[in-house]
Image (cartoon, rainbow, N blue to C red):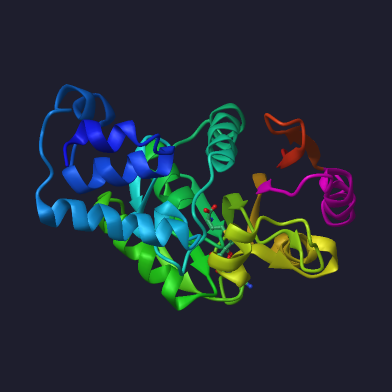
Amino acid sequence: MKIKDILKEDINNEQKLAIEQVLNLSRPELIVNKDRELTKKEYKKYQNINKKLKKGLPIQYILKKENFYGQDYYVNKNVLIPRPETEYLIEKTNKLIKENLKKEDINILDIGTGSGVIAITLKRLNPNSNITATDISKKALKVAKKNAKTHNTKIKLIKTNLYQGINQKYDIVISNPPYIDKNSNNIESKVKNNEPYISLFAENHGLYYYEQILKNINQIIKKEHVIAFEIGENQGKKIKKIAMKYLPNDEIIIEKDYNKFDRYIFIIGNK
Ligand SMILES: C[S@@+](CC[C@H](N)C(=O)[O-])C[C@H]1O[C@@H](n2cnc3c(N)ncnc32)[C@H](O)[C@@H]1O
């Protein structure tokens, strides 16, 4: 079997990623080398990946990687697969850091770090910052630790419930917490059947973690602060209400994603 024979089979994007990984070739290199014969071992490897794809496993868990903000990260079934929407959460937060804080040695807390992509990307963008990242899952923290090491970034990882036991004060609190209503039926089976339940679902129509994080937030934020959340569609107004209850003097910005769904909320304190 040659590369061109596989490409002729009308394979989907995930299968293309699989063949790229098996042969360690980029997509353009596949075309250039289309007459190359696959060894028996390579073909078997490709077929094995195909079998797992047919069973509905996400390609990222099969290949054990996902690209985020231009970098490859290790992922396994113990962490949420990083999503492109989260890249904007970081981009905007970084813009707010530059506009509002005007200093480099900032303290950042990432709550529910999962694979660590938010904390690691922010550290790469702000090398002089001090970053703490928490998660309740020991297995997720193991993945974050591996990624921090691969990306040569120093971040402090803590196993705790949200920010329990943390006494420091932060300039930035960022989180992409679980926000899918636990009674929702409107969730892709590939996601529901494979990604960790604790990374997806929340009580109180998906709002539980926002309230939990915000109700004692004054204990861990500095006077000048930015709180950045990724949120679920149609949750903007409800989370704004929660934020106003605990941080009545803050400026609140809700932003939508490319599909025009509420996706981000930024809570800015200047006083
Ligand atoms: C939606 S995932 C986000 C993962 C990663 N930050 C990202 O954006 O790709 C939510 C994460 O919150 C963690 N989590 C759930 N409940 C938590 C809690 N009570 N305290 C800390 N982390 C929690 C989950 O283990 C999961 O890693």
Rendered residue at 75%/49% (across/down)? 232
Displayed quadrant of residue 62: bottom left
Residue 81: in magenta span: no
Q: Which residue is drawn at 74% across and 67% down?
A: 202
Left or right: residue 72 compared with residue 38: right
The x, y position of residue 150, in whole percent, is 25, 53
Residue 42 % position (x, y):
16, 52
Which quarter holds ligand 1?
Answer: bottom right
Query: Height in image: 56 above or below 248?
Result: below
> Does residue 267 appear anywhere in the picture?
no
Q: In this view, does 206 lie above or below 174?
A: below
Q: Quadrant of residue 252?
A: top right
Location of residue 53 with respect to 138 vertically, above or below: above
- Residue 217 placement (x, y as % from top left): 71, 61
246 part of magenta stretch = yes
Quarter of the figure with the C terminus:
top right
Q: Can the viewer see residue 236 in this picture?
A: yes
Q: Which of 139 and 252 is in front in this view?
A: 139
Q: Where residue 138 sits: x, y (%)?
A: 45, 77
Nearest to the observer: residue 106 or residue 205 = 205
How many numbered discs, if any?
0
Residue drawn at point x = 88 percent, y = 44 percent: 237
Q: What residue is shown at x 11% (from left), y 54% (from top)?
A: 40
- Left or right of 106 on screen, residue 123: left
Q: Would you say 31 lies left or right of 18 here?
A: left
- Magenta residues span 229-249
Quarter of the image that includes the N terminus: top left
